[in-house]
Image (cartoon, rainbow, N blue to C red):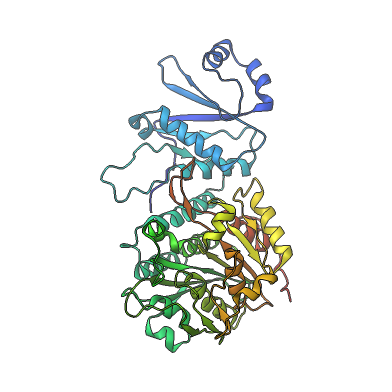
Amino acid sequence: MPAFHFAEKKRKSHIVITCIRHKDFASWLKNQPDEIRTIAAENGFEGKDGQYLIIRGETAKAQQVFMTLGATVRYCNGAELCAFVARRFGSKMLTDTSFEIAAAGLSADEIERLSVGWGLEHYRFDIYKKTKEEKKPALLLNAKADRARIRALVEATFLVRTLVNTPANDLGPDELEAEAKKVASAHKAKMTVIRDGELLKQNFPLIHAVGRGSPRRPRLIDIRWGKASDPAITIVGKGVCFDTGGLDLKPSKGMLIMKKDMGGAAHALGAASAIMALNLPVNLRVLIPAVENSVSGDSFRPMDIIRSRKGLTVEIGNTDAEGRLILADALTYAGEDKNPPELIIDLATLTGAARTALGAELPALFSNRDETLEEVRKLSMTTAVDDPVWPLPLWDGYRKELKSDAADISSTGHGLAGAIAAALFMREFVDQKIEWIHLDLYAWEPYGKAGRPKGGADTGLRTLIALIESRYGQKKKAKAKPARKKKS
């Protein structure tokens, strides 16, 4: 995993960064000595959001950095600050210097957001490059900051991005299983795997069908962590390590970034790593059906009819709609547990229709509970989370589109609203007594921005972690909330 730099202690040189609110700028400037007011004027430091000012001593060495902030402190402010420092100082100076964000005028939550943003700006997927970027300013975390929590959030994000960015020649089902094992081992979680022919013996026919065309054999990864007495939640992540489209072959342009089609699995592992690192009081289960959707003589075909784990027969409308198939078996399995979860969350890079509707940044949110849609949407939009998702309806009027003349259900149907049709299909495999959330996400940043470079991206990750935290336990060192009652 790429390194991120938080200093363990003050270095030879140590520079404090002071944040000034826009509303307080005039009074701050008035109270500064003449030389600072002069430097501010010469540099156009006027209190606008996102401005920076470096103050140097008699030897011309930087001694202090000022930055301006608006009323709202966001993660991107920390990323932009880190990027500014990297631009303005040389590599040698950064090696010997630590930086610290002064606590004055900031809450603990605001310091956390700035610190996490600083850490996220360090992410670069450069493990295949001979020359790596070395300019990574080191932040000494303020005493107000929860170091373990900041590390957990940054590491979870790095894990998601790196898994998505890794090319499929180096990340197939075997390698995804190995990465899952690393996460489980790091937190003393139990992990079991059902592979290849055992999938058929243990009744996971849809997972096997999608993955059987590849020499990289299909499997179902199952991670368990936590106390049986705690509320049970299950996270299911789509793990299609590469998607050719199968016999309904994608055009070359559509296949170009299909290494990201295991983005749901990456998010599931990232969320699980943070939940376990934060020691949230939940009985956590993670299910990842891991396959490669390839073309061979043994590939499943359009119009094949396959009996699912639930017993419903599924007519294959298009082999490029494979994610919902592997999720269907996994969702059925999740509801069969002897300690059934009160909440199932599935995460998947599922449909182009969701991207057409909402673009790259907004995962499409579905749930079988209307109140859950609003709860998650509001949570995602808060400043503390700042990781928006947007609801789409499970519109029952479109269910008729999934009718098949020859089977119990079609995998694709024949109508519009592809994201809704996919969600309606998967709903058929969820025990409706269990609260269910489905996130149709993109897991890719097409352009790049502060704290989020172009490539594999976390979308919905902080929202998912925050949802579990808000429902089942407060931040570390705080008293946990009582478990919620199951909905019926």
Give left or right: position of 230 versus 57.
right
Query: For this rendering, which residue is in front, 43 or 38?
Result: 43
Query: For this rendering, which residue is in front, 422 or 403?
Result: 403
Residue 277 showing in the rendered view: no
Give left or right: position of 466 versus 54.
right
Could you say where residue 163 lies in the image, as x and y percent from the top left? 41, 59
Q: Residue at x 29, y 51 (%)?
A: 128
Q: Where's the C terminus, which quadrant?
A: bottom right
Does 32 sit above or below residue 108? above
Could you say where residue 76 lies in the image, as x and y percent from the top left? 54, 40
Q: Residue at x 64, y 79 (%)?
A: 431
Query: For this rendering, which residue is in front, 325 or 15?
Result: 325
Could you say where residue 400 lies in the image, as x and y percent from the top left? 65, 75
Does 440 sit above or below residue 290? above
Residue 289 showing in the rendered view: yes
Q: Quadrant of residue 90?
A: top left
Could you say where residue 15 lies in the image, as x and y percent from the top left? 47, 29
Query: For this rendering, which residue is in front, 46 or 444?
Result: 444
Q: Quadrant of residue 398?
A: bottom right
Give left or right: position of 430 versus 259.
right
Does 366 sit above or below residue 336? above
